Amino acid sequence: MTSVPMIRQTAGLGAARAAARRRGVHGGMDRRPGWVTYLLLTVVVLASFYPIYYAFLLASSDAPTIAQNPVPSLVPGPHLFDNLGRVISSDIRFWESVLNSLIVAVLTSVSVVFFSTLAGFSFAKLRFRGRRKLLVFIIATMAVPSQLGVVPLFIVMRELGWTGKLVAVIVPAMVTAFGVFWMTQYLDAALPFELIEAARVDGCSMIRTFWNVAMPAARPAAAMLALFTFVASWTNFFWPFIVLGSGNPTLPVALQLLQASYFKDYSLIMAGVVIATLPLVLLFVVAGRQLVSGIMQGAVKG
């Protein structure tokens, strides 16, 4: 069945509107969702947002109030900025940990996008012996828990002298099996062979074809992969806690130091959680619509 955007390009706006109305009456894919769909989406959004708001409520309270009433009221308290100031001025090396997290997240995101797109282009558009079996093997590695490789990976980092350094967090995460699978599936559908053949006829090498043809075509999926990778790197705690420790921490590792041995000030801890979450929320607010729009445009063009 011809899509509505295709009808609009070939037959005009009036024909596209008529096709959309017909498909709406007959229950096609262009039918607008009803109130039940919006109600369910509202419930899902509220349920997803409540943990963040709960952390915000605790961050705006104080320790005695939380001890008396662990479930705070829905109205924020007056101690938010005081608690944020306590986190920033504490002895957890806050700004250094923020810079470390930013360096790790940015470099990891750029590396994962580049190498995953390069591998995805190879698996999707190049023909070589063992291509399918190698792709299946890469996908199968996603079923292996990453915790199983912590001990040998730590031994390797120690032998290289990288323990306590950010390179020990960046290098193992430079490419992911999910990224390779994601970009392979996208380029297989979104990048026509005719564009590659045209570039080769014009004299482009395979690397130049990848950079000038495959990378622009993969931009919507690469943007989503970069966002997912940035969030995962920013919030990663397990491996940085093991290989970096408290000597050169990222932000999640530094925030763990806010917990005392015998007393936990949950208002202080939740203030740290709010600080760590705020950049991710702003990132989604600023880039969310553009990323979704890019995905939809890529789907229509493919």
Image: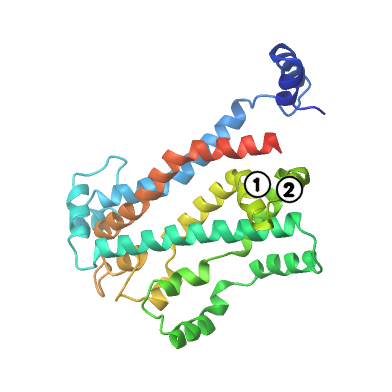
Q: Amino acid at mark 1?
A: Val
SS for callout 2: helix
Q: CA distance from mark 1 to mark 2?
A: 7 Å
| Sequence order check, earlier mark of 1 and 2 | 2
Q: Which mark is residue 55?
A: none
Expressed as whole percent of the image width and height from the top left, the position of residue 236 reads 44, 64
Expressed as whole percent of the image width and height from the top left, the position of residue 27 reads 76, 25
Relative to the observer, which residue lies in front, 247 or 79? 247
Expressed as whole percent of the image width and height from the top left, the position of residue 197 reads 77, 47
Which quadrant does the C terminus fall into?
A: top right
Q: Which mark is residue 196?
A: 2
Relative to the observer, which residue lies in front, 32 or 282? 282
Q: Residue at x 47, y 45 (%)?
A: 48
Relative to the observer, which residue lies in front, 31 or 212? 212
Expressed as whole percent of the image width and height from the top left, the position of residue 100 reads 34, 64
Q: Are marks 1 and 2 in contact (CB under 8 Å)?
A: yes
Q: Would you say 70 lies left or right of 30 here?
A: left
Q: Amino acid at mark 2?
A: Ile
Mark 1 Cα shell of 10 Å, populated few (<14), some (14-19), many (≥20)? some
Mark 2 Cα shell of 10 Å, populated few (<14), some (14-19), many (≥20)? some
Q: Would you say 293 lies left or right of 246 here?
A: right
SS for callout 1: helix
Residue occupying the far front of the picture:
203
Whether residue 265 is visible: no
Quarter of image, res 49: top left
Q: Residue at x 72, y 17 (%)?
A: 16
> Vertically, is 100 above or below 148?
above
Q: Which mark is residue 213?
A: 1
Q: Residue at x 64, y 27 (%)?
A: 33
Q: Residue at x 51, y 79 (%)?
A: 150
